[in-house]
């Protein structure tokens, strides 16, 4: 029996964006996808061969979701901004973008060499040309912060992953948490959501922006196990959260949706990595378009039935790993 769910199909043109096509580029990976004006936009994570300043974010745009044109200039430029943003100008990658009303909000886990990192910077855009920085909205160490696309119970909501993962450096952490805010800037009422302790996500897991379905909030997540690869093996799976109380897990896929299997996922700058920063749902055709990074080197696309993914989430819930099962932290 396969260790991977048979739901997603890789696009035959994979990798759809490769550094080989862009002289000077060393890595183009971990895209954050969103629809804008009838186009598909990807916020790309890019690292150049002449790497003086970590990674940067560029906008790629496409009419068909497969052939992309990459902007010539970085989209997010924290260097040159006033304190505290100027401290966090390095390694601006792995964005999570969410449209709320007519604004696209971008959460970026940013780091530097001075303070502990990454912290999460919130910014916004309406046209993917102008980026407006808003504030730093999480303490470090925190990765993967992702906004829900609408208020729930009158509050903005987000998922994130405080702590760096359960490894020698960060023995605790690596779990996904929920928090809410009246204004996108002040966050609290934190709730643990799910522990990094299932078969394909035993070391750390990380969220992407939740997608609203009739059955619950569908969240594509990555999961890391310590074995294999340069830094463990990175898988992609999904979980389903309660629509009204989104810190409650209705289910999680028992197997990954995608694991590193193809050469462009197994070999690259970091081996054995498939990494998502979001997905686009087409409910008319019941298709999830999952854009992801392969081996921290290139960009790939896989598609699959949204309903099948939801079914897989609901198949079996490891009760001891999920709230309200036996949470590691008890709270009133
Ligand atoms: C994570 C992030 C990602 C990367 C992954 C695998 O911690 O740095 O950008 O894809 O590691 O290297």
Image (cartoon, rainbow, N blue to C red):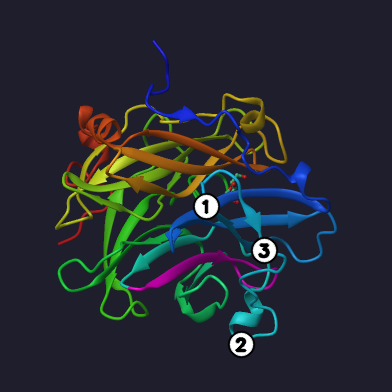
Q: Mark 2 points at which residue?
A: 83
Horizontal relation, residue 48 to residue 84: left or right: right
Label 3, label 1: how many angstroms apart (C-alpha)? 15 Å
Which label lies toward us, 3 or 1?
1
Secondary structure of residue under mark 3: loop
Say which of 57 and 324 sits in front.
57
Q: Where is residue 202 in the image (x, y as percent from the top left)?
A: 43, 36
What residue do we see at 30% from left, 63% from top?
149
Horizontal relation, residue 240 to residue 125: left or right: left
Say which of 105 and 87 sits in front.
105
Secondary structure of residue under mark 1: loop
Secondary structure of residue under mark 2: loop
Q: Mark 3 points at which residue?
A: 71
Which label lies toward us, 2 or 3?
3
Q: Where is residue 280 in the image (x, y as percent from the top left)?
A: 39, 49
Label 2, label 1: how many angstroms apart (C-alpha)? 38 Å
Which of the image's four quarters has the N terminus?
Answer: top left
Say which of 36 and 291 sits in front.
36
Q: What stretch is highlighted in magenta?
A: 102-117
Give yes or no for residue 278 being in the magenta stretch.
no
Of mark 2 and mark 1, the one earlier in the sequence is: 1
What residue do we see at 32% from left, 28% from top?
254
Q: Where is residue 331 in the image (x, y as percent from the top left)?
A: 19, 59
């Amino acid at each position: 029996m396969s260790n991977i769910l048979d739901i997603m199909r890789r696009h035959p043109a994979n990798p759809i964006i490769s550094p080989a096509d862009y002289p000077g580029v060393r890595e183009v990976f971990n895209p954050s996808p969103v629809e804008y004006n009838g186009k598909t936009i990807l916020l790309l994570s890019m690292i150049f061969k002449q790497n003086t300043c970590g990674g940067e974010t560029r906008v790629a745009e496409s009419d068909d979701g497969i052939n992309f044109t990459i902007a010539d200039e970085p989209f997010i430029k924290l260097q040159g901004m006033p304190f505290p943003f100027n401290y966090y100008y390095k390694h601006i990658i792995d964005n999570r973008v969410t449209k709320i009303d007519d604004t696209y909000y971008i959460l970026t886990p940013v780091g530097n060499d001075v303070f502990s990192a990454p912290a999460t910077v919130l910014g916004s855009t309406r046209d993917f040309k102008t980026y407006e920085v808003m504030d730093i909205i999480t303490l470090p160490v925190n990765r993967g912060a992702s906004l829900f696309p609408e208020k729930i119970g009158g509050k903005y909501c987000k998922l994130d992953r405080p702590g760096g993962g359960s490894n020698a450096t960060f023995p605790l952490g690596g779990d996904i948490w929920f928090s809410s805010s009246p204004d996108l800037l002040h966050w609290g009422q934190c709730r643990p959501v799910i522990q990094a302790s299932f078969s394909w996500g035993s070391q750390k897991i990380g969220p992407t922006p939740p997608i609203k379905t009739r059955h619950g909030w569908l969240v594509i997540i990555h999961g890391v196990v310590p074995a294999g690869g340069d830094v463990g093996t990175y898988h992609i799976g999904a979980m389903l959260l309660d629509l009204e109380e989104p810190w409650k897990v209705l289910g999680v896929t028992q197997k990954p949706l995608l694991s590193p299997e193809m050469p462009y996922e197994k070999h690259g700058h970091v081996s054995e990595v498939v990494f998502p920063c979001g997905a686009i749902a087409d409910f008319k055709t019941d298709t999830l378009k999952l854009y992801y990074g392969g081996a921290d080197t290139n960009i790939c696309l896989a598609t699959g039935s949204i309903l099948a993914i939801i079914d897989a989430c609901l198949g079996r819930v490891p009760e001891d790993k999920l709230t309200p099962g036996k949470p590691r932290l008890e709270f009133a």
